[in-house]
Amino acid sequence: MEVLSVASEAYPLIKTGGLADVVGALPAALAPHGVSMRVLLPGYPRVMSGLTGGHEIYWFEDLFGGEARLIAGRANGLDAIAIDAPHLYDRPGNPYLGPDGKDWPDNWRRFAALSFAGYEISRGIVEGYRPEVLHCHDWQAGLVPAYVRFNPGSTARTIVTVHNIAFQGVFGWDVFNGLKLDYEAARTGSIEYFGNLSYLKAGLLLADEVTTVSPTYAHEIRTAAYGMGLEGLLQSRADSVMGILNGIDANEWNPGTDPALAQTYGASTIFNRAANKAAVEQRFGLEPGEGPIFCVVSRLTTQKGLDMLPGLIDMLVAHGGRLAVLGSGDAAIENGFAGAALRHPGKVGVHIGYDEGRSHLMQGGADAILIPSRFEPCGLTQLYGLRYGCIPVVSRVGGLADTVIDANEAAIEAGVATGVVFSPAAEEALGEAIRRTIALYARPKVWHKMQRRGMKSDVSWELSAEKYADLYGSLLGHARDDDADD
């Protein structure tokens, strides 16, 4: 099956969050299931410089305001097509934000162009290549199903995957005439959203199938508490909405081979983590101690629940814990962590920003990772934590609820516990979860069993890739080859 994945980012070419990891990992995971997947990306500077063997496969005389080329190439095995459109994408820094930290004012045009190019490719404009399925990720690719439905020439089936429904691509109606979209899309209300237009709404309404990145999130977004205004639409399409849990690249995230670690290890050599703990202490200026090191590797936002943590740090330290923080985000939250580091030198270390190698080291050396999200479509950091024996402490939402088994006494006795799960996502409950984690750490036999159990969890893409391949096959009306052989 030929599938074109349409997305605004993909690892290793361009990454701002977990979306890139998912888009970058899927092609290799799907290959054993008879799926050939290429990824269509905007030609940001980092994408254009990261492609190897790049060659032009199509030329647009006018793609939303200027000439553009489709450049095919590869990056670490990823088969990619980049939209080389300097008037849209040749800009420094974050792919979505200008130097003032605000959205680029022409983002409506930049990502309409991404969707339009995906649609055009599905019409067969590239010689020898015509994908059967267009797999569209988040609002930036949300217009693909609208182009396929209302503009002529494409027979492709479409899937929209929601990685975070909070981001919906909402713009004023004044941009509609610049979208190259048949007026029928406006007449039918397919793109209208509370007096504006929404790229994500169009995708959710018009795609053949809708997926989210965890089963629990698939249910949550059909409720008013999590649907962000789109719950009614999703309720009406309940039979076409499914959750397929994300996985991680088990080669990229492997404590047995990870070059970012001071000492590699496995489930049977877990005590080698001590060298990484010492490295975390050194990198974050933490004094050695008997208690656990908690870590945070995250965007510092209210969605991630990290506004609740600064007020609990005094308690965490008083109970013998230490804290290492890596991330950036809301200034008030950053300042809260910085203030705690000043109050507790040697107990709290903060690095504002992001560093991929440092994040690997923290998973390999910290004892527990705090993920107190108010909502979390899937989450990847808890999967990294499980893989590295860094106990996840998570709120009971979305993919966190689907992947971490709480260490209550029954689960400990049954030998299934892998982390600490709390509810609701509130400061008091988070504080109790921190106290429970410190108490569990004081039970070394229980703690080490939890670590080993987490490290043996299947957090790879294998099962999820099979589900995606089955979904593609059902859309195309045929069984996959491996099914046909059964």
Image (spheres, rainbow, N blue to C red):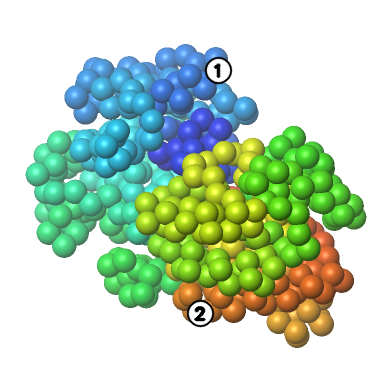
The spot of residue 238 in percent (x, y) is 40, 70
Foreground of the two, 433 or 335: 335
SS class of the residue under badge 2?
helix
Foreground of the two, 106 or 70: 106
Give the number of marks: 2
Foreground of the two, 431 or 446: 431
Q: Residue at x 43, y 64 (%)?
A: 307
SS class of the residue under badge 1?
strand
Tell me: residue 478, above or below residue 12: below
Res. 206 image quadrant: bottom left
Tell me: residue 12, above or below residue 48: below
Answer few, some or many: residues within 10 Å of disc 2's Cα (few below 14, many 20 plus, some between 14 and 19). Answer: few
Q: Residue at x 19, y 59 (%)?
A: 193
Residue pointed to by mark 1: 52
Horizontal placement of 118 versus 464: left or right? left
Residue pointed to by mark 2: 428
Q: Earlier in the sequence, mark 1 or mark 2?
A: 1
Q: Which amino acid, by three-letter code, is at mark 1?
A: Thr
Q: Quadrant of the N terminus?
A: top right
Res. 438 image quadrant: bottom right
Q: Measure how far apart labels 1 and 2 are at the Cα level.
A: 51 Å
